[in-house]
Image (cartoon, rainbow, N blue to C red):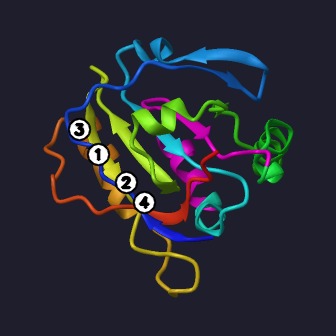
Amino acid sequence: MALTYSSMLELGSKMPHFELKNVMNDKMYASTSFFNKKPSLIMVICNHCPYVIHYHEELKKMNNDFKDRIDFVAISSNDIINYPQDGPKQMKQLFKDLGLSFPYLFDETQNVARALKAECTPEFYLYNNKNMLVYRGRMDNSSPGNDIEITGNDLRSACTNLLNGNTISSNQHPSMGCNIKWK
């Protein structure tokens, strides 16, 4: 595991087009599903990264708090040949164990991770209802072992401001975590 920081995709970027398998129901899920006038939160995560595991409970809370107003989607782009614990079967089992029901997509080609300029897990990308990027970066300033309480404040604030029509600060901090496991 190499500690890596997100590259901070340019604000205002259009959501990339994608069509990926949702491991929860084995159906294809397209980015065009987001054209429903709701904001969208795309999370680049994986199963084994301790930085992602650190946020499991907060992900559940955020999904419960915002699920009716924001579309949640998780994407795993890791190489499953060298990291089989991040494979589709394991992805599905993890979400079942966590009680999460939003789509968990497998980016086998890693093209979506490249389009998002993802560098690490977790990374969070919040898009407005016109599919333009308004927030990218970290959930909060906690991480495994730093004894800072998990609050999700950075991401929660961006979600709340977006939903309330308030300005989202452009002073955003990169996420940090395990590097994407490129093929």
Please give the residue where the numbered disc 4 appears in the rendered image. Answer: 139
Please give the residue where the numbered disc 3 appears in the rendered image. Answer: 164
Q: Are marks 2 and 4 in contact (CB under 8 Å)?
A: yes
Residue type, mark 4 in image: Met
Disc on the earlier residue, 2 or 4: 4
Disc on the earlier residue, 3 or 2: 2
In this view, the mark in front (3 or 2) = 2
Residue interval drawn in magenta: 57-81
Q: CA distance from mark 3 to mark 2?
A: 14 Å
Residue type, mark 1 in image: Tyr
Which quadrant of the rendered structure holds the N terminus?
Answer: bottom right
Residue 168 in picture, x, y percent from top left? 18, 47
Residue 124 in picture, x, y percent from top left? 43, 48
Q: Residues within 10 Å of mark 4 (few under 14, many from 20)?
A: many
Q: Is residue 140 left or right of residue 45?
A: left
Magenta highlight on residue 69: yes
Magenta highlight on residue 74: yes
Which quadrant of the rendered structure holds the C terminus?
Answer: top right
Residue 167 in picture, x, y percent from top left? 13, 44
Q: Nearer the viewer, residue 171 or 179?
A: 179
Q: CA distance from mark 1 to mark 3?
A: 15 Å
Please give the residue where the numbered disc 2 appears in the rendered image. Answer: 155
Q: Secondary structure at mark 4?
A: loop
